[in-house]
């Protein structure tokens, strides 16, 4: 049987696919842009069209599939958007769904991931929730524009600390539980990097790596929201979710460091300085 990977072309999904292929698993990659999936994965895996808002796409996506890596697309802000697909997985007798959740979500009902976790658990489908800290790729991705153009980090996290983790390490964690589905059914895993860092410290590390004077601006929530919605043109639902996450970060929910990644994989997690050095070009013009 095969493993379906949703969000396969994203930061985490592509690493889940790579790790599963190395484990000699048969993989089906799913998304709304098949051409993009073919470009990323070529003939390494099967490619299917899947749209969580179109139930008619569920059958083909889950054909001969018995395990699923489930990721909420950023543009779907309502947890209910995923419920029909979860219900359909139950009818297909899926033996494990690995849901990409958030660190501390068990105590934070605001982001949609909380309700999605609960819905999966109530469905009776065996599950393994991966709850990572903030992605290091957030800095090299969505927030790199300000780093490149203005030498600044424009994030409303206050003086809080965050135990950032590399998406590659998240991908290995997800692949591990999917590969050993029986062992990890009905489990949760809070995975982090090895350090808890403030954005002031992140700015300092990036400055050392890039030889630039990187400043952490620490804007208000209102300035952040207006900037990303009006100037950057990002979807309001997406920005609202990030505001909620940064609000909780200020409450200290993102600072804990765990050893669960190493327990799962037998490997130490990557440091932010290693990540920044390996992704040097992402922070330069």
Image (tube, rainbow, N blue to C red):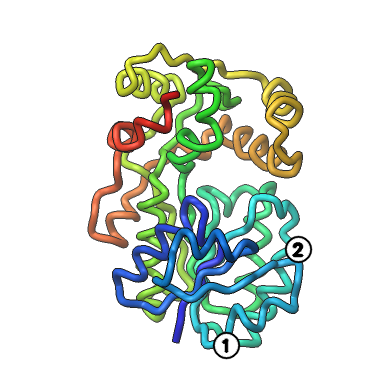
Residue appearing at x 38%, y 66% in the figure: 175
Q: Residues within 10 Å of mark 1 (few under 14, many from 20)?
A: few
Query: Which secondary structure lies at badge 2?
Result: helix
Residue appearing at x 45%, y 41% in the figure: 137
Where does residue 100 sit, x and y in percent of width and height?
52, 59
Marker count (numbered) = 2
Q: On the rendered structure, is 132 left or right of 117?
A: left
Quarter assignment of residue 272: top left
Q: Is residue 280 above or below residue 151?
A: below
Residue appearing at x 64%, y 56% in the figure: 73
Query: Which secondary structure lies at badge 1?
Result: loop
Q: Dots 1 and 2: beta carbons under 8 Å? A: no
Where does residue 20 sit, x and y in percent of width and height?
36, 69
Q: Is residue 281 visible?
A: yes
Residue in front for this viewpoint, 153 or 148: 148
Where does residue 221 sit, x and y in percent of width and height?
69, 25
The C terminus - image quarter: top left
Q: Is residue 154 above or below residue 275?
A: above
Q: On the rendered structure, is 244 left or right of 106?
A: right
Residue in front for this viewpoint, 161 or 234: 234
Quarter assignment of residue 171: bottom left
User: Between disc 1 and disc 2, whose residue precedes?
Assistant: 2
What residue is pinned by disc 1? 93
What residue is pinned by disc 2? 80
The N terminus - image quarter: bottom left
Residue appearing at x 41%, y 25% in the figure: 284
How far apart, in angstroms, are the residues tagged by discs 1 and 2?
A: 21 Å
Q: Is residue 195 visible?
A: no
Q: Is residue 74 above or below residue 246?
A: below
Where does residue 74 sit, x and y in percent of width and height?
65, 50
């Amino acid at each position: 049987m095969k493993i379906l990977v949703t969000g396969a072309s994203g930061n985490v999904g592509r690493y889940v696919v790579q790790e599963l292929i190395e484990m000699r698993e048969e993989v089906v990659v799913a998304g709304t842009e098949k051409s993009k999936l073919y470009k990323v994965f070529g003939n390494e895996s099967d490619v299917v069209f899947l749209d969580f808002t179109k139930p008619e796409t569920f059958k083909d996506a889950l054909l001969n599939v018995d395990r699923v890596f489930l990721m909420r697309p950023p543009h779907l802000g309502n947890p209910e958007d995923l419920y029909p697909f979860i219900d359909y997985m139950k009818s297909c007798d899926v033996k494990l769904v690995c849901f990409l959740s958030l660190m501390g979500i068990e105590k934070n009902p605001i982001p949609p991931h909380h309700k999605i976790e609960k819905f999966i658990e109530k469905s009776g489908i065996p599950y393994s929730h991966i709850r990572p800290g903030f992605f290091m790729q957030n800095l090299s991705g969505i927030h790199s524009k300000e780093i490149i153009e203005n030498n600044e980090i424009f994030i409303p996290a206050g003086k809080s600390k965050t135990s950032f983790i590399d998406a590659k390490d998240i991908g290995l964690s997800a692949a591990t539980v999917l590969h050993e589905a029986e062992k990890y059914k009905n489990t949760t895993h809070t995975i982090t990097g090895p350090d808890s860092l403030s954005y002031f410290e992140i700015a300092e590390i990036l400055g050392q790596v890039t030889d630039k004077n990187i400043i952490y601006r620490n804007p208000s929530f209102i300035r952040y929201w207006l900037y990303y919605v009006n100037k950057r043109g990002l979807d309001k639902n997406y920005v609202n979710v990030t505001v909620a996450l940064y609000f909780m970060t200020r409450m200290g929910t993102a600072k804990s460091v765990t050893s669960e990644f190493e327990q799962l994989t037998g490997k130490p997690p990557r440091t932010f300085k290693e990540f920044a050095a390996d992704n040097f070009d992402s922070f330069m013009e």
